[in-house]
Amino acid sequence: MNDVISTTVNNLGPGPASTPVDWLGTLQVLPGGAVATTVKTGRSLDPGSRQTPVVVDARPWPFR
């Protein structure tokens, strides 16, 4: 597994995104493996931005 998992927060609405934005991620090794949850985190978004990267450190998770 990669040490870093990344995705994006996308603002598709007509106006600026309300901030701050919080996220909580989960990962499951398929089929039927254990489920791990990331630490809840977040940040304020640039009001003019439509897309913001989200990067999570996967090293603390109990499986690889």
Image (cartoon, helix red, strand yellow):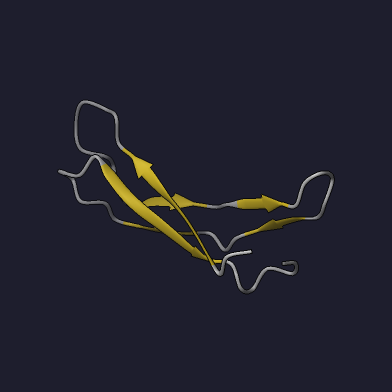
- Residue 42 appears left or right of 1: left
Please, is residue 62 above or below residue 9 in the view? below
Question: At x 28% / y 44%, what residue is drawn?
Answer: 51
Question: At x 75% / y 67%, what residue is drawn?
Answer: 63
Farthest right residue? 32
User: The C terminus is located in which quarter?
Assistant: bottom right
Of residues 8 and 30, the one nearer the viewer is: 30
Q: How many marks?
A: 0
Q: Where is residue 55 drawn, in percent x and y?
A: 43, 61
- Residue 26 appears left or right of 22: right
- Residue 56 appears left or right of 34: left
User: The N terminus is located in which quarter?
Assistant: bottom right
Q: Where is residue 34 drawn, in percent x and y?
A: 81, 55
Q: Where is residue 20 drawn, in percent x and y?
A: 33, 52
Farthest bottom residue? 60
Farthest left residue? 48
Q: Where is residue 60 drawn, in percent x and y?
A: 64, 73
Farthest top residue? 14
Question: At x 82% / y 51%, what residue is drawn?
Answer: 33
Please, is residue 18 above or below residue 63 in the view? above
Please, is residue 14 above or below residue 17 in the view? above
Question: At x 24% / y 39%, what residue is drawn?
Answer: 50
